[in-house]
Image (tube, grey):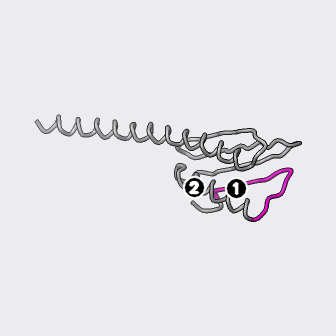
C-alpha cells in the first residue's frame, strides 16, 4: 500500500523520530492487511495526561473503526491495532465465505446442467 493511503496525525504532543518510525511500521502492517485501495487515517490526541487514539479504515469493500484511551503511546497503539486487526480478520472470513458460497452455487449449476 502506498504511503498516500496511510495518514497518521499527532495532536497536542511531539514524538521522537524512533517512536514515529515504530508507529509508522505498526500501522503499515495494518495497511497491508486492509482491503485493497483502503484509506487509513490514524489520529493520536493528547489532552492533559491521557492519549486518545482513533483509526478509520475506509474502502469500497468495508469500513473499520477503532478507538482507545490510555496514558502510554505504546499501549494505546497496540490496543487499536489489535482491535482493528480482529475486525479485519472477521471481515476477511465473511468475505471469503461469501466468495466460496458463490463458487459452490456456480459449480452446482454447471454440474447439474451436464446430466
The x, y position of residue 86, in whole percent, is 54, 40
Q: Is residue 7 magenta?
A: yes
The x, y position of residue 73, in whole percent, is 74, 49
Q: Quadrant of the C terminus?
A: top left
User: Residue at left 72%, top 54%?
Assistant: 8
* CB contact under 8 Å: marks 1 and 2: no
Neighbourhood count class around disc 2 (C-alpha, 10 Å): few under 14, some 14–19, many 20 upward? few
**Helix, strand or loop status at disc 2:** helix
Q: Which residues are magenta?
A: 5-17
Closer to us: 110 or 26: 26
User: Residue at left 79%, top 53%?
Assistant: 10
Disc 1 to disc 2, C-alpha distance: 13 Å
Neighbourhood count class around disc 1 (C-alpha, 10 Å): few under 14, some 14–19, many 20 upward? some
The x, y position of residue 90, in whole percent, is 49, 37
Q: Quadrant of the N terminus?
A: bottom right
Label drawn at residue 59: none
Give the answer, above or below, for where 8 lies relative to 79.
below
Please tell me in which quadrant of the rendered image residue 23 appears. Answer: bottom right
Image side of residue 115 versus residue 89, left or right: left
Give the answer, above or below, for where 37 lies relative to 83.
below
User: Residue at left 64%, top 39%?
Assistant: 65
Label drawn at residue 29: 2
**Helix, strand or loop status at disc 1:** strand
Mark 1, residue position: 7
User: Residue at left 50%, top 39%?
Assistant: 91
The x, y position of residue 99, in whole percent, is 38, 41
Q: Is residue 92 magenta?
A: no
Q: Residue placed farthest to the left in the image?
A: 115
Amino acid at each position: 500500500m502506498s504511503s498516500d493511503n496511510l495518514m497518521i496525525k499527532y495532536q497536542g504532543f511531539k514524538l521522537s523520530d524512533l517512536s514515529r518510525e515504530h508507529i509508522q511500521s505498526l500501522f503499515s502492517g495494518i495497511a497491508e492487511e486492509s482491503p485493497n485501495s483502503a484509506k487509513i487515517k490514524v489520529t493520536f490526541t493528547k489532552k492533559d495526561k491521557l492519549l486518545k487514539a482513533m483509526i478509520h479504515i475506509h474502502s469500497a469493500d468495508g469500513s473499520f473503526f477503532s478507538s482507545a484511551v490510555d496514558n502510554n503511546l505504546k499501549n494505546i497503539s497496540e490496543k487499536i491495532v489489535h482491535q482493528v486487526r480482529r475486525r479485519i480478520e472477521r471481515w476477511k472470513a465473511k468475505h471469503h465465505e461469501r466468495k466460496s458460497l458463490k463458487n459452490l452455487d456456480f459449480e452446482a449449476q454447471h454440474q447439474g446442467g451436464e446430466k
